[in-house]
Image (cartoon, helix red, strand yellow):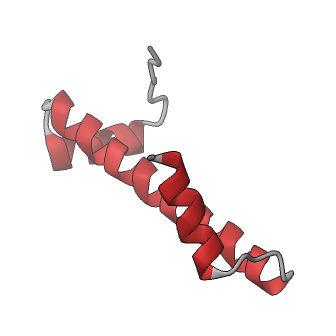
Amino acid sequence: MLNLQINDPELEDNLLQIYGNNKQSIIDAFSQFLQQQKIINDVIISKKQIISGDIIDIDTAFDSVIDMYT
């Protein structure tokens, strides 16, 4: 389990104004933020791979996904 502590009074005030004391709403919002950051990072990595020519053709990509689930 990971526990986070907020040591920024302004950030804490903003969270309280938006979410009140509803900790589950704060957790859900943070989870959504992390998922968005993961997608952004994946897109950045993919773009760098495309630019550097480090790509595979679409058939190989789909075949590798299918192989993982069969």
> Does 69 sit left or right of 13 as displayed?
right
Say if 19 sits above or below 50 in the image. above
Say if 38 sits above or below 59 in the image. above
Residue lying farthest to the right in this orientation: 52
Say if 21 sits above or below 2 in the image. below
User: Between 63 and 33, which is closer to the camera in this rendering?
Assistant: 63
Residue 46 image-quadrant placement: bottom right
> Does 51 sit left or right of 67 as displayed?
right
> Does 27 sit left or right of 24 as displayed?
right
> What residue is rendered at 64% in x and 71% in y?
60
User: Between 9 and 16, which is closer to the camera in this rendering?
Assistant: 16
**Place of residue 29 in the rendered image (x, y in percent of width and height, measured from the top left):** 28, 47
Quadrant showing the N terminus? top left
**Place of residue 68 in the rendered image (x, y in percent of width and height, measured from the top left):** 52, 47
> What residue is rendered at 59% in x and 59% in y?
64
> What residue is rendered at 84% in x and 83% in y?
53
**Place of residue 23 in the rendered image (x, y in percent of width and height, measured from the top left):** 20, 29
User: Between 44 and 69, which is closer to the camera in this rendering?
Assistant: 69
**Place of residue 8 in the rendered image (x, y in percent of width and height, measured from the top left):** 47, 36
> What residue is rendered at 33% in x and 51% in y?
32
Residue 9 image-quadrant placement: top left
Say if 48 sits above or below 30 in the image. below
